[in-house]
Image (spheres, rainbow, N blue to C red):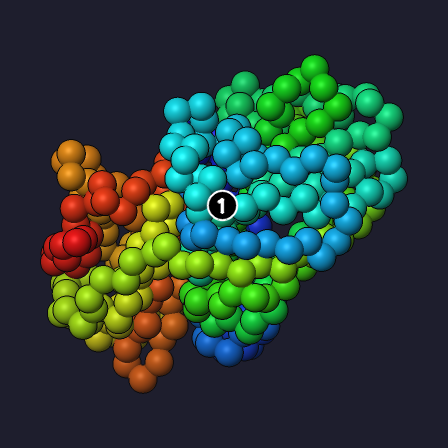
Amino acid sequence: MNKEYNDNREYKNAMDALHFSEEAKNRMVDRLMERAEQPAPHRVRRFPRIAAVGVAAALVLSIGAGATGILKSASEAFAGVFGPTADTEIIDQIGRPIGASDTVNGVTVTADAILFDGYNYLISYTLEKEDGSSFGVETNPDTNLLDLLWEDSTSDVGIRSGGFIGSSWFYDENPDDNAIQYVATMSYDDVVKSGRTTKITLKNLRDFSEDNQKPISLVDGTWHLKFKLDAENCSKELPAGQKISINGKSAVLDKLVLSPIGYNIAYTVDDEVQFEDAESGQAPASHRDTWEEFTGEQFITLKDGTTIDLASGGSMDPEDGKTYCVRQGTFERILPLEDMASLTIGGVSIPIE
C-alpha cells in the first residue's frame, strides 16, 4: 500500500472500528462502543485498529449476487492498496476475484477481490457511476484519500464471533474516470470457517471534507452484495503455552497465528482489567492507557533484521481476576512466512520455522 494510505486510513474510520457485542454493551456499560454490527457471546472490549491492511489465505469464491462482465484478478484489484512493488504472485495465490455487484440510483458497487486468512479479510471494491461522470470528489492532500464514508455498513459472515473489528477507506485510482475505490477490512477473534456466505450492506455515501460543515449526501441508497467463500488456510500456527510478562503482569500465550499479511494472537493476563465508565459510548483517554498496559511490546523480526510492530487492534475480556486478550491486525505489505524469523511478545521470542 502507498505509505500515505497506510499511515492515514484510521483518520477516516477509526470511530467505525469500535465494535462491541450486545452482551459486552450490557455488561461493560457501552464502553468504547459506537455501534455493534453482530451479536457475540463474550464480554469484549474493542479498540480501534491502527494498521489495518491485508489478510491472507487461498480462497475459492462462488458468486451469490450480481456480477460484472469482467473480473479483476486479485493483484489488479489490490494494486492501489499495496502499490506497484507488491508481490503480485503471492496476492494472486492467496486472493481470489469476487465480481459481486449491485446497482442503486445510477451507481454500481462491485466487490472486486478478497484476501482472507481465516481470521481477517480485506475486500477491494469499485464504485462506478453509470452515466460516465466523475464523483466530483477531491483527494485530501494530507492523506491521499477521499473524505468519504458510508452512513452505515455491515458485514455478516454467518457466525457469532466472540468479537470483531474493522476499518475502511476510499481512494481515487484515476481521477479522470467515473470510478472510485473503496477498501474494507475486518478481523475476528475466532476463526471464520470456509464455506460461509458473506453478506455486505452499504448505505448512503457521505462526503465529510473540510469544506462541509457536516457530512453531505453524495449518493443515497443501500447496496447489497453476497458471495460464498471457501478458504484454504495458508497461515501458520506457532506453539503456544509460554509464560510471558506484559508490562510486569504475568501471562500465558494461548494462540499465535501468522499469515503472509495478517496475525491473530491471544494470551491470558493474571489481572482483571478495569475501565473507567464511558459516557454515550465514547472512550475516555484513560482507556488508551489501559489498552497499552495490557498490550506491551509485540513485534515480528524478519530474517533481514527488520522488525514489524504488532498489536494494532483487538479485544480484552475480563473475568474471574484474569483478562483474555486478543491482538489482531494486518501488515502494511505482503510478508511471506519464509521471510519471518521470530515473533516476540512479552519478552519471549518464538522462532518461526
Which structural element holds mark 1? strand
Q: Residue 147 sits in which quadrant? A: top right
The single residue placed furthest to the bottom in the displayed view is 320
Q: Residue at x 37, y 55 (%)?
A: 234
Residue type at mark 1 is: Gly
| Near-viewer residue (1 or 115) | 115
| Near-viewer residue (8 or 196) | 196
Q: Is residue 133 above or below residue 67?
A: above
**Percent position of residue 175, x then y:** 66, 18
Screen quadrant of the N terminus: top left
Q: Is residue 154 left or right of residue 247?
A: right
Q: Is residue 49 left or right of residue 343?
A: right
Residue ID for mark 1: 95
Screen quadrant of the C terminus: bottom left
Task: Report if residue 139 is visible in the image.
Answer: yes
In this figure, what is the number of numbered marks?
Answer: 1
The single residue placed furthest to the top in the displayed view is 176
Q: Residue 69 sits in which quadrant? A: top right
**Percent position of residue 103, x then y:** 82, 42
Q: Residue at x 28, y 77 (%)?
A: 322
Q: Residue at x 53, y 23 (%)?
A: 144
Q: Is residue 97 above or below residue 57?
A: above
**Percent position of residue 21, x then y:** 54, 70
Task: Report if residue 29 is visible in the image.
Answer: no
**Percent position of residue 7, x then y:** 42, 32
Badge 1 density bin: few <14, some 14–19, many ≥20, Cα 10 Å: many
Q: Residue at x 31, y 84 (%)?
A: 320
